Image (tube, rainbow, N blue to C red):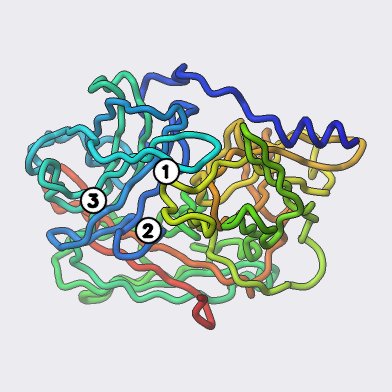
Amino acid sequence: MQKLIVILLFFISTLTLAQTNNIFTNENKIYIPNIKTVLCYNSNKEQSLPVILLNSSETIAFSFDDLLAGTKNYWYTVEHCTSDWQTSRISSLDYLDGFADDRIIEYHYSSNTTRKYTHYELTLPNTQVKPKIGGNYLLKVYEDGDKNKPVISQRFYILDSQVAIAGEVTNSLQVADRDSKQKINFTINHSIAIPNPYQDLKAIVMQNFNSNTAQINTRPSFVRPNQLVYNDLNTNDFWADNEFRKFDTRSLRFKGDNVRDIFRDNESVNVMLFQDITRNTGTFANQLDENGSFFIRNTDGRDDRTEAEYMGVLFTLNASAPSKDGDAYVVGRFNNYTLNKENKLLYDVNKKQFYGNILMKQGLYDYEYIWLEKSSKTIETKPFEGAFFQTENTYQIFVYYRRPGARWETLVGYTNLSNRITDKK
């Protein structure tokens, strides 16, 4: 038993330079295994959503680590996309001032860390690359100026604010779901001409900035002068889920929240978390969380960016498999809620236990367990986390408008809702 735990804890996949895919996809994705800890947010607030106002002083802060250390020749470009993240197929001259691409020149080497890495940073817009229209954008990072060597693709948003959004979080109107779902009603107030809101306007609602939860609204319930109302009985219902689980590795000298053991030697640092249990039965247990976010922190050093350690984190979930045809994953904003082999959990049938080891950078993390049903391709947290209306969640509403005759969609409205009762520290 002890031998098995040690093997699992110290197992970290060997990093190689091999690229898994030589074609960019329009999603948040890392294409080579030596790239870790991609951060992208409005620089006014750490880990805020990557949404900035067009022609303002706001900027996007973007960064990542290369675990092969040294210095690489990384380039980047940005591409305008449709509301459903397809390429807009317009010239870069239509949406960019300056150059179409540039090299990432700001980088810092790690110091006082067991595992060496190089930290790269980028700010957008900048003097070289400056988007000039609102909409969805995809940042593409590639190696040696060759777009056939993809490294990272990252979504961000530029808001050309033309409408106001008023929304609320309420109980589901479906009687059977009132205790487990939350419903979003919202109204778009506008002064611009929208001749055909059923065709030219689209609103997308998502929970906790998780694209897996996105719901598309194309038909307002009521069309009034300068106002579009979306409150249909059967739309924008979301499973309320549960508060996120969390762990604290700001210090590796002391055991933080949910940390059972810390193992370190001259070559690696590994952290074993306390075993988790299912939360799909019983009553709602309120706890503070960050709605899936994570924060790179190192209280043992001075610079979080370059002195935070990389550590193998062992997750263990004591639970029966919900079905015979599915897989469990551990997700959060730390991996953009994506399902891949790095965060897929192994299952021990005899012990009824899921476990997995993920390489992560020192800090504070929210996480949750999800189940992917292979036959239906449905993704649910409910089998492991439960669903309670009292759960505090954030909801994002993005409004896109294509003017008659226009060749692209513009992001004209955005708001971030919450059913938070008290502010978190």
Q: Number of labelled discs?
A: 3
The label nearer to you, 2 versus 3, is: 2
Residue 26 lies, with reference to residue 249, above or below; the image says: above
Residue 424 locus on image (x, y percent): 52, 76
From the viewer's perspective, is residue 162 above or below residue 320? Answer: below
Residue receiving disc 2: 49
Q: Mark 1 points at which residue?
A: 38
Q: Earlier in the sequence, mark 2 or mark 3?
A: 2
Residue position for label 3: 135
Q: Of 119 and 378, which appears nearest the observer?
A: 119
Q: Residue at x 53, y 65 (%)?
A: 290
Tell which circle, 1 or 2, labels the residue nearer the N-terminal end: 1
Kind of residue indicated by mark 3: Gly
Task: Provide residue 311's location: percent of width, then percent of height.
Answer: 60, 41
- Residue drawn at the location 49% of the way across and 28% of the way down: 33
Q: Would you place residue 229 above or below residue 32 in this image?
A: below
The answer for how far apart the CA atoms under marks 1 and 2 are is 13 Å
Relative to 342, 262 lies left or right: right
